[in-house]
Image: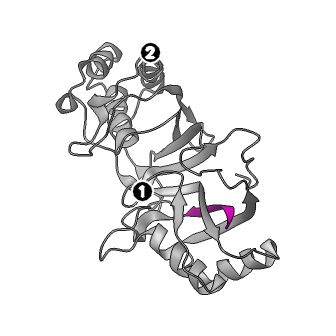
Amino acid sequence: MKRYFLELSYHGAAYCGWQRQPDMPSVQQTLETALGTLLREPVAVTGAGRTDTGVNASYYVAHFDLAGEVVDPAQTLYKLNFLLPGDIAAGSLTPVADDAHARFGALEREYRYYIEPRKNPFTRHTTWQYYVPLDVERMNEAAAMLLEYDDFTSFAKLNSNNRTNICHVRHARWTVDEQGVLCFTIRADRFLRNMVRAIVGTLVDVGRGRHTPDAFRRIVGSRDLSLSSGGAPAQGLFLSDVRYPAGLFERKMKG
C-alpha cells in the first residue's frame, strides 16, 4: 500500500461538514466517490479534522492509501478536479511515508472568521454581514486572554463526546483590512466542535459592549457553556491552515 497526502479547499454550504453522514452530502463522501471512480478501487479518505455543516476550508489536508501507485500525480490531480463538483478543489497530490497521518500528525490548525460591516451580495456566502459597530481594540484585549487558558468547556458544544476539552491556543487576534472587513485568526493544537464560532460570537458581544473584557475572562474561566454567546454563523468560518513537522509534510498550496 502507498499513502498520499491531498491538499484541497472547499466551500461548505452544500455539505453537512467534512465527515461522512448517513443520507447527507459530505465533503469526505464526495471526495471518496471521485477518487474511487478515478483510481478504480475503493478509497477511504482520512481528513485533518472535522468541519461543521456550512463551514469552509481555504486549506485542508487528507490522506488515503492505494494498492497501486499514482504514476503521474499532476495528471491525476487534473482528472480529479474534473470529477469533483465546483465547490471542492484539489490542490496537490503527494506521496508520503506510510505512517504519515493527516489528522494525528498535525501540530497545529488555524481558523479564520470574516465579518463584513456592510451588505455585500458578493460575499454573503463567505462572511458574516454584521452592521453593528464593533470595538476591535476591546475584542483583541479579550481575545488575548484565550492564550492564558487550556480548558474551553465554555465554548464546547454539548453532547459532542469529547474525551477532553483541553486545547492550547497559540494565537488569537482580530485584524481589519482596507475595506473594513474584520478577520479573526486563531491557531491551536486542536479545536472543539463549534468552539471557534462560539468564541467569535462572544467576542462580538464584547465588541458591541454587551460584555467587558473582564467579563469575557470570567466566561472562559467558568467552564460554563450557558454563559457564552450564541455561535457566529457558519458561512464566515474557514479552516485556513494545517501545519505538520517538516519531515512529515510541507504545505504546497498557496493562500
**Type of amino acid at the residue the image marks with label 1:** Gln
Which residue does the image show at 57% across and 77% down from the upper left?
A: 86
Question: With respect to residue 26, does 254 lie above or below?
Answer: above
- Work out which quarter of the rendered image holds the N terminus and state it: bottom right
Question: With respect to residue 129, does 81 lie above or below?
Answer: below
What secondary structure is the magenta-colored segment mainly? strand
Residue 5 on the magenta span: yes
Which residue does the image show at 52% across and 43% down from the upper left?
A: 112
Residue for badge 2: 148
Residue for badge 1: 235
Residue 76 seen from this side: yes
* Drawn side of residue 240 relative to residue 159, left or right: right
Span colored in magenta: 1-10
Residue 33 on the magenta span: no
Q: Quadrant of residue 152?
A: top left
Q: Quadrant of residue 247?
A: top right
Which residue does the image show at 38% across and 28% down from the upper left?
A: 166
Question: With respect to residue 215, does 16 lie above or below?
Answer: below
Toward the viewer: 145 or 102? Answer: 102
Residue 181 seen from this side: no
